[in-house]
Image: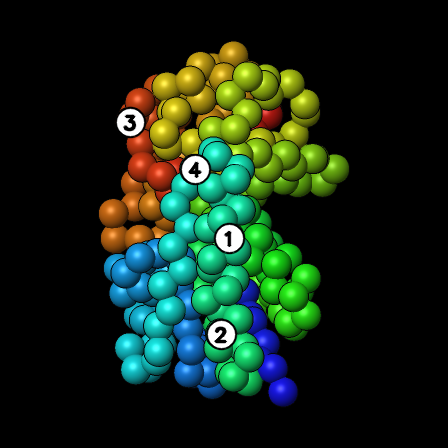
Amino acid sequence: MKGIAYGVGVGPGDPELMTLKACRLIRENDVIALPGKEPKETVAYKIAAAAVPELSEKELIPVYMPMTMDREEQRRNHLAGAALIEEYLEQGKNVVYLTLGDSSIYCTFTYLQAILEEHGFKTELVSGITSFCAAAARLNIPIVEWNEAMHVMPAVHRLGEKLELPGTYVLMKSGSHMKEVKDILRASGKEVQMVENCGMPEEKIYRDTEEIPDEAGYFSLIIAKDRR
């Protein structure tokens, strides 16, 4: 029997927001994969270890897939990561790949998942609390109400777009181009709030576009709502 590869969301940062299922899968399986060169230095590991101390006793696989816009390099990295996981699956061992937030939202595991399934292996996604739901709760606001629409965008890839549609915009991956993102937000006329490093010790909250620094961290999430 071949093993199963699980893509497990560990939530946005607060260990108390990890699901019972995520914790159980970590406890029940011996091989844990993490996205980075040094597994114990990854954010996903630090979150999960705080909730499941047994994680320190597991066999940790570093799956390094550096950020790049080169599609060929991306493909090589994905194939290498999948091959590493397949070594364990062939031995009949399950592999639990820990990922931030939810395993179906801009998740690196989904690239590996496609390759693994193409190679005949079984995979399962395990949902976690998304960063934007956690950020809205931290801001103590609803994301959408009644018949409002929600638009989720990776801001760094959509810098030329305008926020013209009615409803709430969630802008993820904004940090590296925050100055340009702020220009888009000003032009939208929407009410803007941002959480940086939601649920982590270094968390910061900004209640207006002008409060947001031009240089913000990678884990910066913006919620832009229609004005009442």
According to the picture, the residue beneath numbered tag 4 turns out to be: 68
According to the picture, the residue beneath numbered tag 3 turns out to be: 215
Among the two numbered marks 1 and 2 on one chain, the one whose residue lies closer to the N terminus: 1
> Does 31 sit above or below residue 220?
below
Among the two numbered marks 3 and 1 on one chain, the one whose residue lies closer to the N terminus: 1
Front residue of 4 and 176: 4
Please tell me whether mark 4 sits on a helix, a strand or a loop: loop
Instruction: Left or right? Give the position of 196 relative to 11.
Output: left
Residue 108: percent from left, percent from top = 50, 52
Among the two numbered marks 3 and 2 on one chain, the one whose residue lies closer to the N terminus: 2
Nearest to the eye among marks 3 and 4: give it. 4
Residue 23: percent from left, percent from top = 45, 76
Write the residue at 31% across / 22% down.
214
Structural distance between the alpha carbons of marks 3 and 2 = 41 Å
Q: On residue 89, which mark appears?
A: none
Please tell me whether mark 1 sits on a helix, a strand or a loop: helix
Do the residues bearing badges 4 and 1 touch, measured as CB atoms within 8 Å?
no
Write the residue at 68% across / 23% down.
165
Structural distance between the alpha carbons of marks 3 and 1 = 30 Å
Q: Residues within 10 Å of mark 3 (few under 14, many from 20)?
A: few
Nearest to the eye among marks 3 and 1: give it. 1
Residue 24: percent from left, percent from top = 48, 80
* Amino acid type, callout 2: Glu
* Amino acid type, callout 3: Glu
According to the picture, the residue beneath numbered tag 1 turns out to be: 78
Q: Quadrant of residue 211?
A: top left
Write the residue at 46% across / 83% down.
29
Front residue of 197 and 97: 97
Q: On residue 87, which mark appears?
A: 2
Instruction: Left or right? Give the position of 154 relative to 199.
Output: right
